[in-house]
Image (cartoon, grey):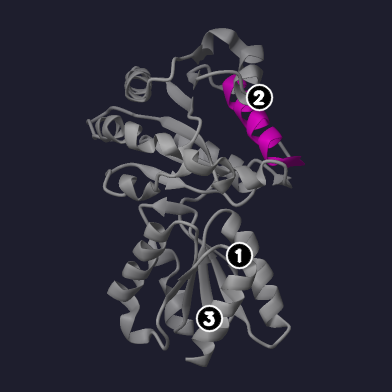
Amino acid sequence: MNATLPFAQAMVTALVDVMTVDPSVVVLTEGDSLASAAGVQVDASRVIALPVADRAAVAFATGLAWAGKRVVMEIASTGRLPALAEALVEACRTRPGWRTTIVLRIPSGAQAGVLDAASIDLLTGIDGLNVVVPRDAGQAVALFRSALASSTPTILLESRALQRETAHVDERMGSFAGEVVRTGDHAVIITSGVGVHESLVAAHSLAGAGVEVSVVDLVCVAPLRPAAWLKQVVDTGRLVVATNDAALGARVVAAVLADAFLYLEAPPTIVTSRAESIADAVRAALAY
């Protein structure tokens, strides 16, 4: 695959590609979706429709994974995470020689209102579980491939706000480590998913006034990987966390206070993922 595609189409194409080349890939779905419909065209026997029974569905996926399958599971919203957590703990238990390759694709975003009320913070204590948030279609496909190559479960949170956005998609694998997408000397903005786009807009507006900021994409929001972005905090001394999940923002700040407190020149700030709020927070940090 080497093309510019909308987010939703890119994920459908990626699923069809992996199902075509790997007969161990199976899809668990709760209803009709573009991805499951496309999977049926490849091999209908590997697309399994399940009732809405969260714990049972994860347990079924775990059994399939332990039997050697690579499972792609579709969940309707992050509001269902509390019901999944207990079963995910069991799925993530390490057993010598056993793989538990499960990729849970979950749409997220305020567009669904209370359906997405649950915080990912309840998953942070599950050892072996990775929760990743792609910022565009290209990164989503790359992370999807990496998750299918992993031996432990991965939750792929796909922003509803990005579903019609286009991006270049290629054959690369994704990294769960944080990524510096813009460099600057005055402050660092740490964010994820759609927040990366808002942060880059803020950074561009600040650059017009001579303020250069770094923008870091967390990529993996649970567990955090501070080694990938602490250097930017140390170098600039000023931190703004842009996120709509207050618990995530608090965990980022806690990681910085634990390992880079002495380098801070202003209090860390947590703001919503809106360009105007982010830019204002950077200005306030510089004025401190």
Q: Main secondary structure of the magenta part?
A: helix
Seen from the viewer's position, the closer of residues 129 and 269 is 269
Residue furthest front in the image: 114
Label of residue 274 in the image: 1
Residue kind at label 1, given as amino acid type: Arg
**Mark 3 highlights which residue?**
187
Q: CA distance from mark 3 to mark 2?
A: 41 Å
Disc 1 to disc 2: CB gap under 8 Å: no
Residue 192 position, x and y percent, is 52, 57
Label of residue 224 in the image: none
Q: CA distance from mark 1 to mark 2?
A: 30 Å
- The first of marks 3 and 1 along the sequence is 3
User: Residue at left 72%, top 46%?
Assistant: 165
Q: Which span of residues is magenta-colored?
A: 4-20
User: Residue at left 41%, top 60%?
Assistant: 246
Indicate the quadrant containing the N terminus: top left, top right, bottom left or bottom right.
Answer: top right
Left or right of 195 in this view: 70: left
Left or right of 220 in this view: 262: left
Residue furthest bottom in the image: 287
Left or right of 261 in this view: 26: right
Residue kind at label 2, given as amino acid type: Leu
**Mark 2 highlights which residue?**
34
Seen in the picture, residue 235 relative to 107 is either above or below; the reply is below
Seen in the picture, residue 126 relative to 13 is either above or below; the reply is below
Q: Secondary structure at mark 3?
A: strand
Is 184 magenta? The answer is no
Residue kind at label 3, given as amino acid type: Ala
Crowd band around label 2 with a 10 angstrom C-alpha radius: few (<14), some (14–19), many (20+): few
Q: Quadrant of residue 283?
A: bottom right
Q: CA distance from mark 3 to mark 1?
A: 17 Å
